[in-house]
Image: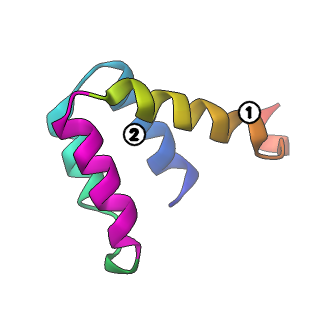
Amino acid sequence: MPIQWVADLYQAALCVDDCRLIALIEQIPENEESLAKILTDLVDNFRIDIIIDLIQVYYDERPATARDL
């Protein structure tokens, strides 16, 4: 998913905006259905903390770009 989508998902998770989270999850392409299902299950089970943790790991592990500076 595009970096802006990830940033939007992170912001929605930080705000505990489950409606926005579901709207973003619905944008996931069908070929990534398993990702959509896992994220939906996390939202449905009030485990937004796990979404936040996963995105933080993603940010920590991805290479820095000139746009990040």
- In this view, the residue in front, 21 or 41, is 41
Residue 61 lies left or right of residue 12; in this view the side is: right
Measuring 54% from the left and 37% from the top, which residue is drawn there?
A: 54
* 43 within the magenta span: yes
Residue 49 lies left or right of residue 53; in this view the side is: left
Please report whichever mark, 1 or 2, sits nearer to the chain's N-terminal start: 2
Residue 55 placed where, x, y %? 55, 37
Q: Is residue 50 above or below residue 67?
A: above
Residue 20 placed where, x, y %? 21, 38
Q: CA distance from mark 1 to mark 2?
A: 16 Å
Query: Which residue carries the number 2 mark?
Result: 9
**In the rendering, which numbered label is found on residue 60?**
1
Measuring 60% from the left and 30% from the top, which residue is drawn there?
A: 56
Measuring 76% from the left and 45% from the top, which residue is drawn there?
A: 62
Residue type beneath disc 1: Asp
Q: Quadrant of residue 48?
A: top left
* 38 within the magenta span: yes
Q: Is residue 39 above or below residue 51?
A: below
Residue 18 lies left or right of residue 66; in this view the side is: left
Neighbor class of circle 1 (other Cα within 10 Å; few <14, some 14-19, many 20+) is: few
Residues in magenta, as a range: 32-46
